[in-house]
Amino acid sequence: MRKGKLLVISGPSGVGKGTLISKVLPRLEKTCLARSATTRPRRQHEKDGREYFFLSREEFEERVRRGDFIEHVRYGSNLYGTLRSEVERNLESGRNVILEIEVEGAMAVRRQMPEAVLFFIAPPSFDELRKRLIGRDTEISAEIETRLARAGEELALQEKFDYIVINDDIDRAADELEQKIRACLEGGKT
Ligand code: 5GP
């Protein structure tokens, strides 16, 4: 059976990766989203095993020792990681797998799985990203500043990605992302 493709969707926090993926994923055949593990506290609307597997720091570190992660990073004061189990069995069974992760993790995935295709979702401007992060109202203001500082570093790495999509308008950007994913699923990485 033909193995699925690994599609990494990355970009700064607040840029709209999650919203874009929720629009594009239902349009794609045989494609799933891998759930990550994190030590971040669960937000009110989130459910364990749906948005993330929420782990204590001890559980997370134990799983790092067991080699359960393809990559893991520290982001702010929390740990996030891509679970091997979420990725490998799906690729083996012919499903494409999407990872929604930050930029350092995307670079680590590329080193380990060079066949992965990397998409960078960019904001129209840094100011717009700031507005979105504040408007999202999921983080306290110190956390927003940490995320914005990190966003500056992340934006500097966008040229290392295979594709860049600017999220200036959600519907337009979703169409562009879908078309780019289709091009890479049909034709291989170009
Ligand atoms: P949030 O706390 O907003 O859910 O996520 C913070 C950042 O961590 C986002 O940019 C998100 O894409 C990223 N992230 C989520 N899961 C993973 C993961 O497994 N690995 C890495 N490297 N980043 C992740």
Image (spheres, helix red, strand yellow):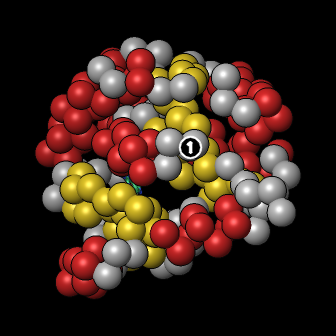
**Type of the residue with mark 1:** Ala
Position in image of residue 171 (x %, y %): 71, 28
Horizontally, residue 89 falls left or right of residue 60, namely right
Which is more toward the observer, 60 or 127? Answer: 60
Seen in the picture, residue 139 relative to 158 is either above or below; the reply is: below
The reply, left or right, for residue 143 in relation to residue 71 is left
Please say if 106 is above or below 127. below
Residue at coordinates 67% horizontally, 62% vertically from top-left?
Answer: 91
Q: Nearer the viewer, residue 175 or 85?
A: 85
Q: Is residue 46 visible?
A: no
Q: Name the residue carrying label 1.
A: 116
Can residue 29 be seen in the rendering of this structure? yes
**Residue at x 25% of width, y 83% of height:** 62
Query: Where 107 falls versus 34 (above or below)?
Result: above
Q: In the image, what residue occupies the spot 31% across and 60% down? A: 72
Q: Position of residue 164 (x, y in %)?
A: 54, 22
Q: Going 29% across and 66% down the picture, which residue do you hit?
A: 40
**Dividing the picture into quarters, in which one does residue 4 lie?**
bottom right
Could you tell whether 125 is left or right of 61 in the image? right
Task: Name the quadrant containing residue 110.
Answer: top left
Left/right of residue 39 with respect to residue 177 in the rendered view: left
Give 89 or 80, whichever is nearer the viewer. Answer: 89
Q: Quadrant of the N terminus?
A: bottom right
| Badge 1: residue crowd in 10 Å (few <14, some 14–19, many ≥20) | some
**Whole-percent x and y of residue 20?**
62, 39
Q: Is residue 25 above or below residue 15?
A: below
SS at circle 1: loop
Is the CB of the residue bearing disc 1 within 8 angstroms of ligand 1? no
